Structure formats: C-alpha cells, structure tokens
Amino acid sequence: MGARDGGRLRWRSQNSHGMIRIENLKKNYRTIEALKGVNLQVGEGEIFAYLGPNGSGKTTTIKILTGLASPSSGDAYLSGYHILRQTLDAKRQCGLVPQTINLDHELTVYENLNIHGKLFHMRRRERLSRIDELLEYVDIKERRDSPVKQLSGGMKRRVMVARALMHAPRILFLDEPTVGLDPTIRRKIWSLVKKIQQSGSTIFLTTHYIEEAEFLADRVAFLEAGRIVALDAPQAMMGRLGAWAMDEIVNGEMETTYFKGREEANRHVALQKGSFALRRVNLEDVFLSVTGKKVQP
Ligand code: ATP
C-alpha cells in the first residue's frame, strides 16, 4: 500500500524483511556453480550495488530475481512475494534495465513504451499519460516519435529506464546501466538513478565502474565466484582500510600501502626513493583487498 511521506509517495513493503530478500540462493549451469549460496537483504529506498569481476554471478542473480532464470535451490522474495510461488506478484514489483540494449529499434520511443504498458495490462489512457510523464522524467520528451535506431547510446539507456518504470515498480534492477557511455552521459544517468531513489524506489545495481557504486550506493556487496565476500556501506568499507593509499611499482608489480591518516602517509612517503602516487582510498581498493582482483571494464 502507498503512504504519503513528506508529500512523496512511498511504499511500505509487505513484511519486515525488506524489499529484496535472498536466502541461500544457488544456481548451477551444468558443471558451473554460478551462485554458491547467496544471502542478502535490501531495504526499502536503498540503492544497493552488487559488484564483482566478470563471471562472478551478478547477472545470474538479477535474472533469477526478475524471473528470467530459475534458481537451482534457495529462496528469494521481492517486497515479500516469493519469486517462484508468487511469480506474477513478484514480477509486478520490479522493473529491469538489462545489460544489452533490447529496445525494438524500428519502433519509436513511444511505441516501445506502449508495448511494455500493454504487456502489463495498463489501460490506454493510463499508458499515454504514463509515457508522457516518464519521457519528461528521463528528459527525452522531444524524441517521443523518433525511431529508436536514430537515438544515441545514452538516449537509448534513458528510454530503457523509462520502459522499466512504466508499470510503476517498487524495485528497479539496473544491470550495468552506464556501460559504454561517455562520462557526461554517465553522470546524467547517475542523477536519474538518484531521482528515482528519491521518489521512493529501491534500486539494485550492478556495475564495473566502481566509482559509480561509490557515488550512488548506500550499501555494496562484493561477489566473487558466486559468493558474497564483503557487504557494507562504501564509507565503512573504505574506512576499515584507511584514508590514504600509496601506489608504487615493486619488482614489476603494483603494490599499495594504506594509511589511517595523512601524517602517517607523509612519514612513509618521505622515506621513498622510487616513484609513487599518494591518493585517497577508494572503493576499488576495497575490492582488491577482499578479492585480490582488478575489476575489468
Ligand atoms: P559479467 O560481469 O561478465 O557480466 P557476471 O558477474 O554477471 O559477469 P554471470 O553472467 O552471472 O556473471 O555468470 C556467472 C557464471 O555463470 C559464469 O561462469 C558464466 O559463464 C556462467 N553462465 C552464465 N549464464 C550461463 C548460461 N546461460 N549457460 C551456462 N553458463 C552460464
């Protein structure tokens, strides 16, 4: 049920377990164990980033949650609805922006959104007003009647976001929403994601751009080979590592040393003979420390 909160429409989840709840989720593709028992909960209105190297199981998780793949075992709930036992209700709770652009390129922006509305049994009047509202929202109103094939990559992404929001889902899944976009357009998408959160939605995001997660996410989970290896707020994770980092090449390998404060870092730096770079700790450092891997874009 919707409830007014400071003039904004907010949604109360069906029970106290949060908007997304995943319990011991496993997925095998023949001999590949893509998910080895994932547990997590995402609270209402959170932006949750799900990070990990290629093949760690991010897309598999999203596919299972959005009904595009079935789990081998385990349970998952969207706003309290079980994804297998209450499939239709669970599907209504979520919108998906997949990794690859899957709009119909021959159809116009309007037609793409209209088809989605029909699939969700929205009435014609409701569809029309929602399309106008959303195209304004994602700032692409002037391209309403353009064929999708004439749009830039950034515009297509925004149309995908609008399409995912057509049926007013409470949870939005974004699988690599800014891949291949230039920094200006990427920031435009970030603003849009924040705006969607402010309207009361819960957002589950995967990305290889760690700075994207650092900027957007309230909490982050790092996934490695089908298991969550760390989960917390970005600032808390970075704070445990330190505040400053010094990178240097030692025997042909990059080595990073972490320091709690600037003074400690300065003392260490004063003793350095070779070249080095001193910088602030970032979320990529956390990823490296928990998985020992570099994220490949
Ligand atoms: P990326 O960052 O490259 O998108 P990911 O973290 O999203 O990777 P998944 O796509 O979930 O990873 O893949 C997890 C594992 O499952 C990989 O080993 C992958 O090869 C395997 N996998 C995914 N989909 C299938 C499939 N349809 N059939 C067989 N194996 C699959």
Image (cartoon, rainbow, N blue to C red):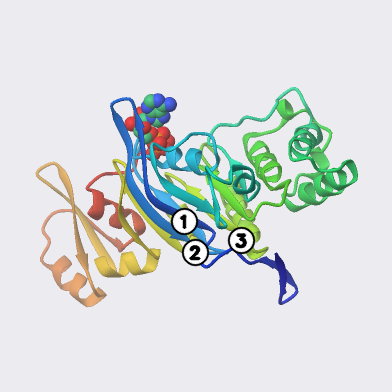
The image quadrant that residue 149 belongs to is top right
Q: Residue at 47% across / 35% down in the picture?
A: 70
Q: From the viewer's perspective, is 83 left or right of 274?
A: right
What is the three-letter code of the residue carrying label 2?
A: His
Q: How far separated are the C-alphas under marks 2 and 3?
A: 19 Å
Residue 208 makes an appearance in the image: yes
Residue 201, placed above or below residue 32: below
Of the residues tagged 3 and 1, which is closer to the observer? 1
Residue 159 picture location, percent across and down:
70, 40
CB-based contact (under 8 Å), mark 1 and mark 2? yes
Q: Identify residue for label 3.
A: 197
Where the C terminus falls, by quadrant? Answer: top left
Residue 10 picture location, percent across and down:
68, 67
Residue 75 picture location, percent across and down:
43, 48
Q: Identify residue for label 2.
A: 17
Where the N terminus falls, by quadrant? Answer: bottom right
Q: From the viewer's perspective, is 268 left or right of 52?
A: left
Some atom of ligand 1 lies within 8 Å of the CB belonging to the residue at label 2: no
Q: How far separated are the C-alphas under marks 1 and 2?
A: 7 Å
Return the mark for residue 137. Answer: none
Secondary structure type for disc 1: strand
Some atom of ligand 1 lies within 8 Å of the CB belonging to the residue at label 1: no
Q: Residue at 71% across / 70% down in the picture?
A: 3
What is the three-letter code of the residue carrying label 1?
A: Arg
Q: Identify residue for label 1.
A: 21
